[in-house]
Image (cartoon, helix red, strand yellow):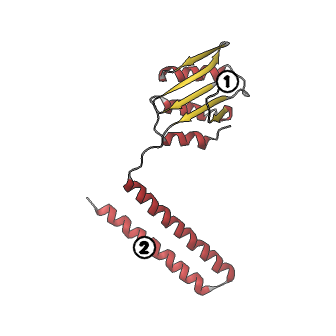
Amino acid sequence: MMTKDDILILKTKLLPAGAEAVIDFLAARNGQLEATNIVLENVPLLIIGRHGMIARLPINGRIKKVSQAEEILPALQSFFANTSSSEKLYVFVNLPDLPIPPEVQQVLSEVEARALRRERIRMQIDQALDRRDRVAFEIAVKELEEIDREEESALWRTRRLP
């Protein structure tokens, strides 16, 4: 079974035309989906790649192969309408990640570092409280307040820039 998070992560990839509607449809049927790392034969299969999608689905007793974006969603709807809840659709995904500009990656790294620092300080506060160490508690609280001031001043600087 694919989790909804696994399916929603697909939206962070470079999707072919029409894939977003297909992914939304699949999210509601995640219990009937199985991720695969290889292209399987003789099973209901959906392949999502950078340049398009292909579905091989048993419909009306025959394997139907569709590759046009506008045909895939109706074919999937028909497949799920006519199958038991125990039948699986195998999903093979070969999508690249969205390119993240270096500037954005740097900002993300800085935010992650601040979040880790904040969490470390909160753990220090908890430990100081557990030990009833007033001095360590006050030092950690001051450090947390300093982080808050730094973030607030950085936020105001970015809001003032034209």
Quarter of the figure with residue 110: bottom left
Residue at the location (42% across, 45% down)?
99
Q: Earlier in the sequence, mark 1 or mark 2?
A: 1
Residue neighbourhood size for the residue with mark 1, other residues' Cα within 10 Å, grouped as few (<14), some (14–19), many (≥20): some
Q: CA distance from mark 1 to mark 2?
A: 58 Å
- Asked which secondary structure carries label 2, the reply is helix
- Tell me the tag on residue 149: 2
Q: Nearer the viewer, residue 146 or 120?
A: 120
Q: Amino acid at mark 1?
A: Val
Q: Which residue is mark 1?
A: 43
Place of residue 62 in the rendered image (x, y in percent of width and height, measured from the top left): 65, 13
Place of residue 109 in the rendered image (x, y in percent of width and height, measured from the top left): 46, 60
Q: Is residue 113 above or below residue 37?
A: below
Q: Amino acid at mark 2?
A: Arg
Quarter of the figure with residue 79: top right
Image quarter in which the C terminus is found: bottom left
